[in-house]
Image (cartoon, rainbow, N blue to C red):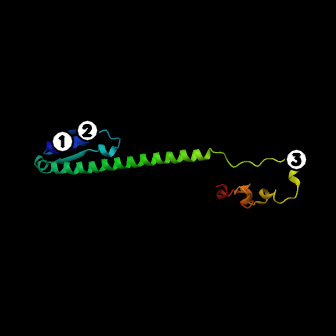
Amino acid sequence: MFQQLEAFVRETGKVTLTIKMAGEQMSVVVVPCGDSKEAALRQPLVLTATPAELDEGFVQALQSFEGAHRSLAEQVSATTEILQAAEKSQAGKAHKALSKGSKAALPVPASQPDGEGDDADPADDAGESGDVPAGGAPADPAAKAGGDGKTDLFALL
């Protein structure tokens, strides 16, 4: 019995074993007391039977409990690793996005001195008609969206 308990104690760090009699029945409580923050990994194994039945089935029940406990611990560990990797990845993406966003925005068209913007040259008024100037982006994305007050997000790219 203690050889089977040894593997479980090594895995969890500490195990509390409580045995009590209630009439002809014996209750055995095996509580893993490991470092895990996961409550499911601290759930006890509680067996109540006659001493003869416990002699026959305790080791098998403990092995089954230990296997389930190990499987759950591995799942918790794997999930934690996945979440930490995803967190690092998202932090990297956010950092890159913020770096790109802090670069200079599209240049603001230079204001023209009074009187120069009144001529009827259609080439000078390309931004006002919603055409795309030589830079490749519309001068006024809201004008390109159709004048409904909504901004065409694709035009901003």
* Residue 20 at x, y percent in the picture: 17, 40
> Residue 157 at x, y = what percent?
64, 55
* Residue 103: percent from left, percent from top: 63, 45
Residue shown at 49% from the left, 48% from the top: 90
In the rendered image, which residue does mark 3 sit on? 114
- Residue sitting nearer the eye, 138 or 69: 138
Q: Residue at x 25, y 41 (%)?
A: 31
Residue at mark 2:
13
Q: Residues within 10 Å of mark 3 (few under 14, many from 20)?
A: few
The alpha-carbon separation of the residues under discs 1 and 3 comes to 91 Å
State the CA–CA distance, disc 1 to disc 2: 10 Å
Q: Which residue is mark 1?
A: 6
Give the secondary structure at mark 1: helix
The residue depicted at 20 percent of the width and 44 percent of the height is 7
**Amino acid type assigned to the residue bearing label 2 in the image:** Gly
Looking at the image, residue 84 sits to the left or right of residue 42; the answer is: right
What amino acid does circle 1 point to? Glu
Q: Earlier in the sequence, mark 1 or mark 2?
A: 1
